Image (cartoon, rainbow, N blue to C red):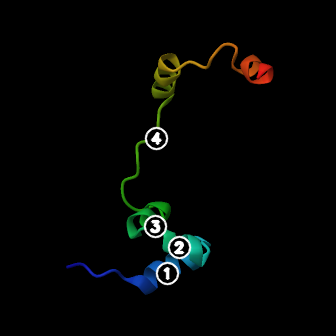
Amino acid sequence: MNRIAWPQLMRLGLAGLGLTPETFWQLTPVELMLMAGGGDGPPVPTRKTFEELASRFPDAANAACDVEQQ
């Protein structure tokens, strides 16, 4: 069983990342390590990925007008 090094994680979160205690305790150790730059996070979308998503899910042409009319 792996033990969690709480003193080091607390130092990292509170002093290193400037988190509040409330925010720190809401995170899992994995989330904390990702915030600190460790581990493999989700891939960063490329311009091509963004353009593919934009073509698959276009903004409504009259979205601003629809909101104003309601």
The reply to whether discs 2 and 1 touch (Cβ–Cβ < 8 Å) is yes
Q: Of the residues under marks 2 and 1, which one precedes in the sequence?
A: 1
Query: Alpha-carbon neighbours of circle 1 within 10 Å: few (<14), some, or many (≥20)?
Result: some
C-alpha separation, residue under disc 4 versus residue under disc 1: 28 Å
Residue projecting furthest to the bottom: 7
Pointer 4: what residue?
A: 44
At a point 46% along the width and 67% down the height, the residue shown is: 32
Which of disc 4 and disc 2 is earlier in sequence? 2
Q: Which residue is mark 2?
A: 24
Residue that numbered label 3 is attached to? 32
Indicate left or right for 59 with 7 as reference.
right
Mark 3 in CB contact with mark 2 (< 8 angstroms): yes
The residue under label 1 is: 10
The 10 Å Cα crowd at callout 2, few under 14, some 14 to 19, many 20 or more, is some
Please state the horizontal and vertical placement of residue 41, each as a whole percent of the image: 40, 52
Label located before the other in sequence (3 or 4): 3
Element assignment for label 2: helix
